[in-house]
Amino acid sequence: MGVRAAIARKPKVPEIRKGDTVVVLSGRDAGKRGTVERVIRRQPAPRGRSMFRRGTTAGGVSVVVEGLNIAKRHTKSRQSSSSTDRMPKIQQGGIFDIAQPLPIGRVMLVCPNCSRPTRIAHATLENGRRVRVCRHCNQQLEVKA
Ligand SMILES: [Zn+2]
């Protein structure tokens, strides 16, 4: 049992966060922009064989972007057999739009200052806080919550 916990404690600033505007680089929605609704972080495979899994991006992070990568879910209306008088479990049928997660490698952050897709640089402020910086205009990319 090796002691490797210290390695994982690296204080890394996430590249893309909730509330960021991103542009999709490839796929059906290529070129479209949207706001990040959710960042999903998948743990690296716990069995120690992750080196052999192909197609995994570093860290396995994906993002759900509002209104993009939509999957239409067709749902039939159905009635549960266990319906009571109080709760007739009828599920309304219809088509639901569900935003599917996009691998982080398929999106690029759009700078809110110069509105160009940008790569991210990191800077450390005087108070020690790490911030993301646009490589084009050198402005901070922090989202004002
Ligand atoms: Zn910029």
Image: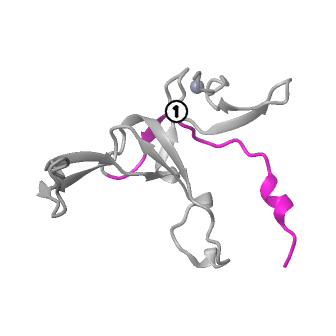
Q: In which quadrant is the C terminus drawn?
A: top right
> Does 133 appear in magenta?
no
**Residue that appears at 59% across and 26% down:** 143
Where, by quadrant of the figure, is residue 59 drawn? bottom right
Front in this rendered view, residue 54 or 101: 101
**Residue that appears at 78% across and 46% down:** 11
Classify 56 as above or below 141. Answer: below
How are the residues colored?
one colour
Front in this rendered view, residue 47 or 65: 47
Tell me where residue 5 appears, x and y as whole percent: 83, 63
Which residue lies under the disc numbered 1?
20
Which quadrant of the figure shows ligand 1? top right
Front in this rendered view, residue 118 or 40: 40
Front in this rendered view, residue 8 or 51: 8
Dot 1 lies on which element?
loop
**Residue that appears at 17% across and 57% down:** 83
Classify 139 as above or below 38. Answer: above
Specify few, some or many for label 1: CA neighbours under 10 Å numbering under 14, 14-19, or 20 or more: many
User: Predominant secondary structure in magenta?
Assistant: loop
In magenta, the rendered stretch is 1-27
Tell me where residue 136 appears, x and y as whole percent: 61, 28
**Residue that appears at 42% across and 46% down:** 25
> Does 21 appear in magenta?
yes
